[in-house]
Image: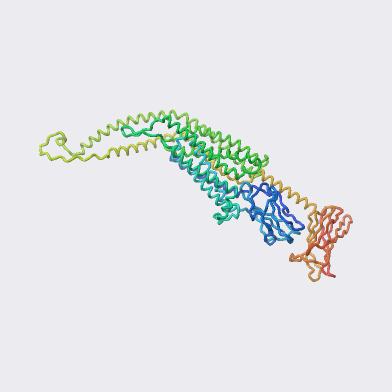
Amino acid sequence: MTQTIAPRVRTLVLLLLAAACALLTGAGPASAHAAVTGSDPGQGAVVDKAPARITLTFSEPVALSDDSLRVLDPEGKRVDTAQPATVSGTTYAVPLHSGLPDGTYTVAYQVVSADSHPVAGAYTFSIGAPSKTSVSVSGQSTDDGVVGWLYGFGRYVSYAGFIVMAGGAAFVLACWRRGSGVRPVQRFVVSGWVALTASTLALLLLRGSFTGSGKVADIFDLSLLGQVLQTKSGAALVSRLLLLAAAALFIAVLFGAYARPSPTTTLTDGASRRQPDPSEDAEQKRDLTFGLSIGGVVVAAGLAASWAMSEHASVGLQAGIAMPVDVLHLLAVAAWLGGLGALLVALYRAPADTPVDAPAVRRFSQVAFGSVLALIATGTYQSWRQLGSWSAFTDTRYGQLLLAKIALVVVLVGVAWISRRWTGRLAQTVPVEASAVREKERVGAGADGAGEAVAVGDRDARAESESGLDTDERPGTESAGPAEPAEPAEPAEPAGSERAAQLARQQAARDAAQQKRMRDADPNRFGLRRSVLAEAGIAVVLLAVTTVLTQTEPGRTEQEAKAATAASASSSADEGASGALTLNMPFDTGGEDGKGIVTIDVDPARVGGNEMHVYVERPNGQAFDIPEVKVEFTLEAKDIGPLPVVPDHIATGHWSANGVQIPMAGDWQVDVTVRTSDIDEVTVSKNAQIG
């Protein structure tokens, strides 16, 4: 039966790992956890004169670098003059050159949010009037490429390594102390430590490129590494490495002194027998267990805090409460899922002479139940804090992933309940199995004694028959021939003792194999194995969803950003409905240099006072001056007008007039008279809804 189980186990584990990797791959890059909630000038705004600075407001504090805020002119050249600075709270600004020409400008930002995730984006605004721009505005963030994928994978490995290391060690100390001497369990815990250490070093190297250029070549840039060490995320990663050194010492004691067997005594027949556990040795064992438990909890809590102090829990509402809650949540996950992995290893890989027993499984069931209760309490608080409303469950990506996580936890708890039933049945069969083993040992011992006596007799008979001597030539008989001097006897070779030891080892191996086959044939133990394997598979996918969840913008932040964007769009729509009127009219006066385009901007294009701007450009887009520009407004449906407006010359190709009165809403005809010389002029017209 063991031969049938092993291929199925390997196939199922490979499928589960493939599903987890596919989930991580399809998750995409880490979403921004800080969102732009306001800007001045705003998205798509058209301003009359060049602003002195650009300001951006985020939903939470962000970290700035020299190139965090960049302003590019229509040709793609930078027009900001200094490093960005904090104005107040979550508002940041960068100054601009004075006297910027008209056209469309691009504002690009790349910052790091307070929960360690990069935020990048861009938008445009215009001075005077919109124009063509050579700047390519891309929504791609620096974490979209290979570096982003490697960083996300490193985060998954770090979470998995912590869960395996902390949960496996907790399983040994709290549930199955004999497991400290089981080699597969030792390898399981040590592999978690190695994975967490390697992934932490990788994240430290990747961090600078991940939050900066996103280039693979910058991974080993020592200057970027120095900048990372000065950030909150860098400090958290370095703290994690220091705590991993303490964790290495803990693991060495757990699988060293703690796993060492009790002293043995050598009997007169040369055999070794384990002494009964004396009270002094038991007290030392209890003290060592207590010390390891306290030290392990402190180290595990410190490692969990290295995530809490640099991610979601460190910013937003009630950060002082959220961080310890996050630590408790991660410890509960490790105790449950890591202990589950250690139990799976023990069920499949533990040697025959040290099987995991029903009491150990029952104790783990109790630990898992307590962990689930802790997860429910801490998870409820975290959900409220990160979502803020019921609608965020379905309207945000964070809420949708959280629903998937909750569903997986429910399924996992259901499978764990099945495992608990198998544990109860297994506990009922343990007394019967123990008595059967004792009876087998008693019968086997008697058979071995009889067999040994028979073997001795057979060995003597074979020695006589193989010697080739007649009866008369045997020692103790007389011979007719002359007696020859006897040769000295050679010492007997220890072949018998070596052969006996070899046979004993072979018999022990056969007994162990038979015992393992008998144990594997137990339907209760087989059922427990399958249910625990299913739990472990679901746990792998659950860990993948959790990792993606920690890289996703919280629902509360996403909804705030959507509300700010909607408010801005609504404001722009209102302005568009009532004004922001722009009319482009080509003209040709017929004379020399008489062709061009005249643009009329009326703001807010509603009843009452308005501001009007007139721009004159050549066909190639270059502004130029003409002798005279006149504008008239006529509402033929109401027989109003023409209302003349003579704008003032402001700059080359730019005229302006304030207080232009529109007495009534309607479909107004706008006539523009353009004179390019003393005798060359033309009037062009367009209709527009005003008011």
Tell which of 687 and 633 is nearer to you: 633
Q: Is residue 684 left or right of residue 392?
A: right
Q: Give the position of the N terminus as an image quadrant.
A: top left
Residue 281: image quadrant is top left
In this view, the residue farthest toward the bottom is: 592
Q: Quadrant for residue 109, please give it.
A: bottom right
Residue 406, can we see it? no
Say which of 148 and 636 sits in front: 148
Residue 291 visible in the current orientation: yes
Coordinates of residue 37 in the picture (x, y in percent): 70, 48
User: Does 308 sit above or below residue 430?
Assistant: below
The image's colouring method is rainbow
Q: Percent from the top left, x then y, of residue 172?
A: 48, 36
Nearest to the observer: residue 23 or residue 580: 580
Relative to 64, 353 lies left or right: left
Counting the numbered discs, the total is 0
Q: Residue 583, percent across and down?
A: 79, 59
Q: Taking 591 as reference, is 341 above or below it?
A: above
Residue 679 in the image, given as x and y percentages of width and height: 85, 70
